[in-house]
Image (cartoon, rainbow, N blue to C red):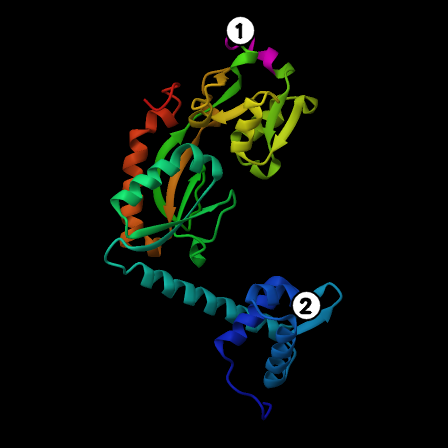
Amino acid sequence: MPDSQKPLAWDDFRLIKAIADAGTLPAAAGLLGINHSTVFRRLGQIEASLGTPLFERHRAGYAATAAGEEMIGLARRMDEDVAAVTRRLAGQAVSPSGELRVTTNDSLLVHLLTPLFAKFRLACPDVRLDIVLTNQALNLSKRDADVAIRATDQPPETLVGRRAATIAWALYGRAVDFPDGAPADAEALHGRDWIALGEHLAALQAVKYVRANVAPERVAYRVNSVLGLAEAVESGLGIGHLPCLIGDARPALVRLAPPDPALAADLWLLTHPDLRHAARVRVFLDFLAAEIAKLRRFIAGEEPVGRG
């Protein structure tokens, strides 16, 4: 054991984990919010204290040694323990107050959630909402968000929550392009220009439908946002599948086919098990579930004109 060895601090483990996660010192420095030279110096001090290298330097980056792998594993367990304690403490709040971070996507926010969030703020003014828009799943275990509102058929097993509604999807085009409504021959629609969602949304049934039924040369436009797809249909770029709550809310669009049950997705309100009893989380989820229930027929495509 080297004479200079001293107990490692939590910041030392954070640095080791950051290098392992990032693969390079500059990227690790970015994660930690410190200088590249500081990371280099501190890693040298840690390795000198332990008397063994934790990483091998390669042209492509830093690769962990056997000792490094052991330290990285410990660092990750410590990080998970810290996150778990933070969640439990956050779950002990006894009144609905404080900040609540909610993740969802742009289409749900614009066409469904913003008015509901406004109603919630009137009912619970001591809860401040921080909305994070992304189609990617944030890590609720690390408190990237407290609540996730997602359209999915397979919510993560690590989260708990409730299914609030079923989101219907149908095929839409511009009303001006279909003055007589949907053509009697549905197959004729496959000869028109189509708009499709990007492949990173490949889990959606609408993406799978286009891939299986529409010739590639008929896909004139791709976009990685459902809201962007609605804008494209409205602009006359082609026809495409949309959630009925989006398509039916746009007077310039018309349904070209009834809602397809095979394309439907469930709307889930999700949180981490450690947070489900937190007052602000519980009140928020209960409020949203009740408000969405009032719109369930509209979301399910059963009220084609407005919310009724």
Which stretch is magenta?
Answer: 179-189
Q: CA distance from mark 2 to mark 1?
A: 62 Å
* Numbered label attached to residue 70: none
Report the front residue among 137 and 55: 137
The secondary element bearing badge 1 is classed as loop
The secondary element bearing badge 2 is classed as strand
User: Sequence-wise, which precedes: disc 2 or disc 1?
Assistant: 2
* Numbered label attached to residue 184: 1
Q: How many numbered tags mark residues here?
A: 2
Q: Is residue 126 magenta?
A: no
Q: Is residue 236 above or below residue 48?
A: above
**Residue found at the far bottom of this picture:** 3
Q: Please name the amino acid that badge 1 sits on.
A: Ala
Q: Quadrant of residue 244?
A: top left
Report the front residue among 155 and 107: 107
Residue drawn at x 59%, y 39% as measured from the top left: 200
Q: Position of residue 119 (x, y in %)?
A: 30, 39
Q: Position of residue 80 (x, y in %)?
A: 45, 64
Report the front residue among 307 and 160: 307
Q: Is residue 180 left or right of residue 20?
A: left
The quarter of the picture where the C terminus appears is top left
Residue drawn at x 58%, y 23% as measured from the top left: 235
Q: Please name the amino acid that badge 2 sits on.
A: Tyr
Q: Is residue 233 left or right of residue 291?
A: right
Residue drawn at x 26%, y 53% as measured from the top left: 96
**Residue found at the far right of this picture:** 59
Q: On the image, numbered disc 2 is attached to which residue?
A: 62
Q: Is residue 40 above or below residue 193?
A: below
> Mark 2, residues whose alpha carbon is within 10 Å: few (<14), some, or many (≥20)?
some
Q: Main secondary structure of the magenta part?
A: loop
> Mark 1, residues whose alpha carbon is within 10 Å: few (<14), some, or many (≥20)?
few
